[in-house]
Amino acid sequence: MTSSVDEPLIRAALAAARRAEGTDDVPIGAVVVGPDGTELASACNAREALGDPTAHAELLALRAAATALGDGWRLTGCTLAVTVEPCTMCAGALVLSRIARVVFGAWEPRTGAVGSLWDVVRDRRLTHRPEVVGGVLADECAALLDEFFAAHR
């Protein structure tokens, strides 16, 4: 269920994604907020910039948020907002981080692992399953990707 805080979270993730403009990185942005709603971290994709196949916006934001909290790796009570449905790698990291909520914009039917192609985060065999809200500002998030790929083809 979309709450009144979801759209501002996705807008913050869109702002993070726009930091990738002018680079060869796909403009995907992620933001992590603490249980009180305070922004802990934000990141954009940086695979090309860092030469790192794991430098997805979600993973970079999770790492920075864990550092900001300073309480180890658990992000209990936190929310991650991202402009595009997370892939399997990122979905696994979300489960392992103990994130409470995942909010995303555009659905990704080819690689999405939070409800589209797979549903890793809600697999009942896992010990942690975050709440998921998908499709928030989906058209706006998809448009950012469409613009990027139109310019790079």
Image (cartoon, helix red, strand yellow):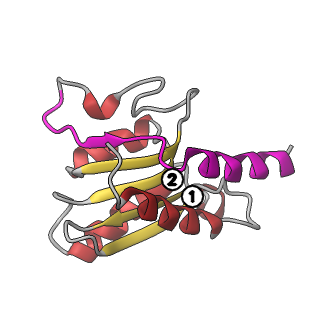
Residue 89 in picture, x, y percent from top left: 42, 40
Bin the neighbour count of mark 2 within 10 Å (Cα to Cα): few under 14, some 14-19, many 20 and up.
Answer: many
- Residue most extreme to the front: 4
Residue 15 in picture, x, y percent from top left: 57, 69
Quadrant hosting residue 69: bottom left
Quadrant hosting residue 19: bottom right
Question: For numbered disc 2, what is the local secondary structure?
Answer: loop
Q: Is residue 74 visible?
A: no
Q: Magenta stretch? A: 126-152
User: Residue at coordinates 70% horizontally, 49% vertically from top-left?
Assistant: 143
Q: How many marks?
A: 2
Up-down: is 116 above or below 74? above
Q: CA distance from mark 1 to mark 2?
A: 5 Å
Q: Nearer the viewer, residue 103 or 111?
A: 103
Bin the neighbour count of mark 1 within 10 Å (Cα to Cα): few under 14, some 14-19, many 20 and up.
Answer: many
Residue 119 in picture, x, y percent from top left: 36, 27
**Residue labelled with disc 1:** 45
**Residue labelled with disc 2:** 56
Q: Is residue 44 visible?
A: yes
In the figure, is residue 84 to the left or right of 127? right
The image quadrant where one finds the C terminus is top right
Name the residue type under label 2: His
Cβ atoms under marks 1 and 2 closer than 8 Å: yes
Q: Nearer the viewer, residue 34 or 7?
A: 7
Name the residue type under label 1: Asn
Quadrant hosting residue 31: bottom left
Residue 93 in picture, x, y percent from top left: 32, 46
User: Residue at coordinates 24% horizontally, 60% vertically from top-left?
Assistant: 78
* Residue 145 lies in the magenta stretch: yes
